[in-house]
Image (cartoon, rainbow, N blue to C red):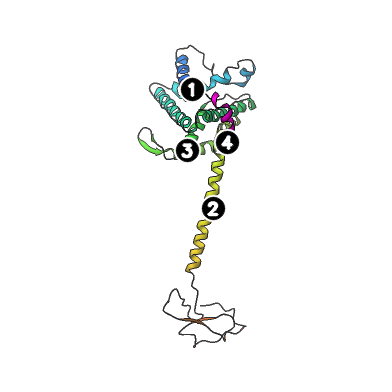
Amino acid sequence: MSLLDRLERHFGRFALPGIPLIIVAGQVLAWFALLRGLIAPGALVFYPPLVLAGQWWRLVTFLFAPPPFVFSPFPWGILAGIFAWWLFYFMGAALEGFWGAFRFNAFLFVGYVFTVGAGFLEPSLLVSNLFLGGSVFLAFAYLNPNFEMLLFLIVPVRIKWLALLTWAAYAYEVLFAPVSIKLQVLASVINFFLFFGRDLYLGARLKTRAVSKSAARRATARAADEPRHRCRVCGRTDKTNPELDFRYCSRCAGEQCYCSEHIFNHTHVTAEDEAVPHP
């Protein structure tokens, strides 16, 4: 039984179901409150110095900060927001249905803990929830690689290709982005590798074995295609000329093979010229 199985057995009853809906509803309410001026801009973000100064609620409220593009000019901002919120809810609910509430809670909690930890490692870091949402997308894409999405609401594309682009973007940011972005990216994918690392490792081993077996089969096939007999004089073989009879000369040094036309018509090989290559 894995550690996660044991934890679920003991603490599964404390799992909070419906987290995707809670997060989406919280972000929608926060977006509306920001538009109406009910809360100040920046009141929800996680900024470590302010947390250490006593504003501990920022450890939670940053999860409900709406994505910045929802404040773009109407109608593109709200359309993008609706799509992003629907996508997060759809994928999060699918993962929760597949894993169960406890495991989905654990997946988000691990990402949350490392994201917050990254914030304290870099005190000037304004922590975003975008990368944490990205981990949900990557998990869904890993489990449902052939799920099709309409890119720009027109072009159907399998989600695995979008996930590969996301991984490529993350790799670029880890290599070239500022330290604050590097930390957020790394923190947001730790939960992915904790949950899927074993599957990735076993899958890589199976692929390696499959490649080895395929290479062995090809080598066996090539060996099977090699002729058993080759005439030292003319080079014909039992594969190219199966109608011929091949024999070995007892008077030649080594095992020298000849076809029926040359078995009695050849110069005998001595020990000195045994190494002469066949034609």
**What numbered label is drawn on residue 143?**
3
Evaluate whether residue 113 shows in this view. Answer: yes
**CB contact under 8 Å: marks 2 and 4:** no
**Vertical side of 21 occupied by 225: above or below:** below
* Tag 4 near tag 3, CB within 8 Å: no
Q: Residue at x 56, y 41 (%)?
A: 198
Up-down relation of residue 11 to residue 143 (above or below): above
Nearest-to-viewer mark from 1 and 2: 2
Disc with the residue nearer the chain's start (4 vs 3): 3
Give the label on residue 23, or none: 1
Helix, strand or loop under label 1: helix
The quarter of the picture where the N terminus appears is top right
Q: Residue 153 location in percent, x, y? A: 36, 32
Which residue in the rendered view is the most extreme toward the left?
154
Magenta stretch: helix, strand or loop mostly: helix
Give the image location of residue 81, x and y in percent. 43, 24
Please give the range of residues in magenta: 1-23
Q: Which residue is mark 4?
A: 194
- For mark 4, give the secondary structure: helix
> Which numbered disc, 3 or 1, marks the residue closer to the eye?
3
Q: Say whether marks 2 and 3 touch (CB < 8 Å).
A: no
> Upstream in the sequence, badge 3 or badge 1?
1
Mark 1 vs mark 4, CA separation in Å: 23 Å
Residues under numbered marks 1 and 2 in contact, where contact means CB atoms less than 8 Å apart:
no
Residue ID at (44%, 22%):
70
